Amino acid sequence: MRWVKFFFSLLLTLLVGAVLLFPFGSTPFAFGTFFDPFVGFWSNAESNDAKADLTLSLAELKGEVVVKYDKRGVPHIFAGNSEDLFFVQGYITAKDRLWQMEFQTMAAGGRLTEIVGIGKDSVVLNLDRSARRKGMVFGAENSVEKMKADDASYKALQAYTKGVNTYIESLSPGDLPIEYKLLGYQPEQWTILKSALLQKYMASTLSWRSNDIPYTHAVQLWGEKVFNTLYPEYHREDEPIVPKETRWRRREVLPAMPIPTAYHPDSMLIAGDFAPPSRDEQIVGSNNWAVSPSKSKSGHALLANDPHLSLNLPSIWYELQLQAPGINVYGVSLPGSPAVIIGFNDSIAWGVTNGSRDVLDHYTITYKNDKKKEYLHDGQWHLIEERIEEHLIKGGEIYYDTVRYTHIGPVMYEDGFAPKGKPLAVRWMAHDPSNELETFMKLNVANNYEEYVDAISTFVCPAQNFVFASVSGDIAIWQQGKIPHKWKDQGKFILDGSRRDHIWEKFIPQKDNPHAFNPPQGFVQSANQHPTTARYPYETQGRYEDFRGRRLFSLLSEKDSMTLEDMQAIQLDNYYQGAADILPFMLSELDTLQLNAVQRKAYDALKQWNYQYTTDKFEPSIYQKWWGELYRSVWDDEYKNSPLALAYVKNRTFMQLLQDSLDLSYYRIIGDSTDYSRAYHINTSFKKALSKLKEERESDNFEDWTWSEQKKTSINHLSRTLTPFSRLQIPTNGNGGILNATGTQTGPSWRMVVELGPEIKAYAIYPGGQSGNPGSPSYDSFINDWVDGKYYKLDFMKGPEVDGDYHTLKIKKKNSKE
């Protein structure tokens, strides 16, 4: 039945897509291969009872490897040595996720046109150009060299690569994942560069963000005093990652600001067609925390992590256990890279959230002449290095793009690649040689706090908040990354590439990165908020979350004798701190005598609301709509009338301005002489929000306005085009800015809680399934339970000799006679 529904849905999607989106003869879909009666999509169907014990023989192994699959399809891999372990990890991961692995690295490497081939004017080509112009391949090549220098990392990568390629070489045409058949191409051999590109793919997701272009526009338009009011570095009532009372010692002198201090160039050189950042504050981030034995009911340390990322099918994570002499670790891996990224072993557990630090700056470049062979820096002309990027477009076309490299980094924006005006080079930490795999290889086998610190100390980009807990009862958190040591506001605005004093020269000493070890409060936590107070002696520019961290700190402070069930409840918490901060004030400003019956009913309901975002409540829908209308009422005229793209004022900042400012110049509307007040905007936006909800829901019955109708979550196929391979419009609790940060396309990608006792206890879930095959029951089998807030008990096996609901894959070394 699954395949019957899928077939007709897919067929309709393909036919409509081919007719509407592509000229005749240019569709990327390979219908002949896809519908072939022998090797087409029919051969990808799997049944619930398809699992059975199996034995394979492979020449590449040194000894026998046993893989125990539990009832959820999680492989527990037992090997006699680490090389066989990582070889089989590569083999098994490719078996379940090959297309995903390759597609992600093709996207990272700017090669999607080779797959879809829609022409030189396509959006896909622009995505590919962007990937190469920002130096994704350049950074990956540098990382490969760094990984080769570490023997353990390089051997693991070599073994993993061999495992992937051994699986690829075993495939017949009928065995290919369905996406290859549909798009009509074959998998390539896996390489270490592809694994490095996967690391850069994650670095781009988590650190390719900077406001320096729209900030430059804003400071030129409004001046520094107004800029500092609208875009403050800190807010009242912030609860940073590191406890407020932490005392800091600066090991490096703060670099001197250049003279003159007006270092940002004329913003009119940067065109207004540069797209502004989104007002959507659903930051791709995460929550993590650890609780000391003194606050734990069991007397053991507890740890939780739930990274918030784009929700895709196949899932970004692949769950597994790895065991060989010296290693026994459980958690999730990134398909395409060895080791476990988030998880636990016999002695410790760890998790990560995004540090949100600014490690990307833009620099204006001054060429000597129109030939663009030399650029100015520190009073001298330096040679440009050119890379001719060859974009192969499926069908035979080739697009050539010249990317010019300076000592700063690649010149991303020029020659019609927006924005117009002066060329802009990018300095991005992910370009530097780095070996993030080394960190996770060491964490997988770490036994204590000292080994955890050693493991993370070399992690470069993206900066992450590594939380830690151990069987011995220690807890800790470090914000770790290679962070530029900047002078005040360096990189907040566009920098001048011709000036030596604008270039990054030093980095914050690793020992001075924000951290806490066994703090008196009995817990450590992070939710992408600011890492420290203003007393921290270094620059901490970044894009930080304003609400989840405060809520998390409050919940952890209030409760003692915590259990794993309490940890789960915090991950599933649907309370919105932002609404609690501002809604009482907004309600106090309403003129209740001017409300009609429906408006009064909404007012009364909001006064009683507990700020919970659950599917059965209508109050979140009213508040969200009201806040959006109020924001637009005050700010839209500023943004629409600006000749240049501006960064949006953050919700937290606007909330404080509303409460502090009875009369604010931005309450007035550009081009209108009326003296609009704060009360005017609050009252009119309230009524407008209710009218819009009535129109959208075609009802003024509040039961038709529930959060389940207003916000739905879609878990899209990674291609973003194959709708039948997606799970769409799922009613979910939570929202951006809430601990349960489930948005429309982002959310908790792996919920995990661990108790570090003599016997490790752990529960987790992610929104997907182990298989990357849409025809498999294991493709999306966890999603319903994830939506319902359920967790699975993790089976941390001591060895392969166990009874129970498992099926076994034995992989033997192939002898010369076989």
Image: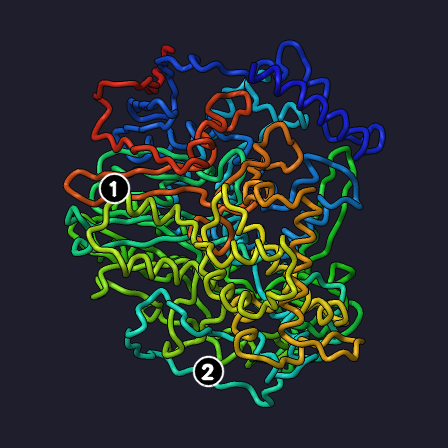
Q: Residue at x 56, y 43 (%)?
A: 706
The image's colour scheme reads rainbow
Task: Judge depth for marks 1 and 2 and give the one in front.
Answer: 1
Say the numbered circle drawn on residue 773.
none
Q: Nearer the viewer, residue 280 or 237?
A: 237
Q: In the drawing, does residue 441 fall left or right of residue 563? A: right
Say the numbered circle drawn on residue 345.
1
Label 2, on which residue? Answer: 255
In terms of sequence position, does the residue under pointer 1 or pointer 2 come before the other?
2
- The CA span between labels 1 and 2 is 42 Å
How many numbered marks are there?
2
Q: In the drawing, does residue 434 fall left or right of residue 121? A: left
Question: Considering only vertical position in the picture, is 600 above or below 39?
Answer: below
Question: Which quadrant of the rendered structure holds the N terminus?
Answer: top right
Q: Which amino acid is tagged 2? A: Pro
Q: Can the viewer see residue 406 in this picture?
A: no
Q: Residue at x 45, y 42 (%)?
A: 749
Question: Considering only vertical position in the picture, is 535 above or below 334?
Answer: below
Image coordinates of residue 45 in percent, x first then y, are: 54, 16
Q: Nearer the viewer, residue 818 or 779?
A: 779
Q: In the drawing, does residue 451 fall left or right of residue 595? A: left
Q: Which amino acid is tagged 1? A: Asn
Label 2 residue SS: loop
Question: Considering only vertical position in the picture, is 484 above or below 174?
Answer: below
Q: Residues within 10 Å of mark 2 (few under 14, many from 20)?
A: some
Q: Quadrant of residue 364?
A: bottom right
Q: Quadrant of residue 682?
A: bottom right
Q: Residues within 10 Å of mark 1 (few under 14, many from 20)?
A: many
Image coordinates of residue 732 in percent, x first then y, are: 50, 41
Label 1 residue SS: strand
Image coordinates of residue 299 in percent, x first then y, are: 15, 49
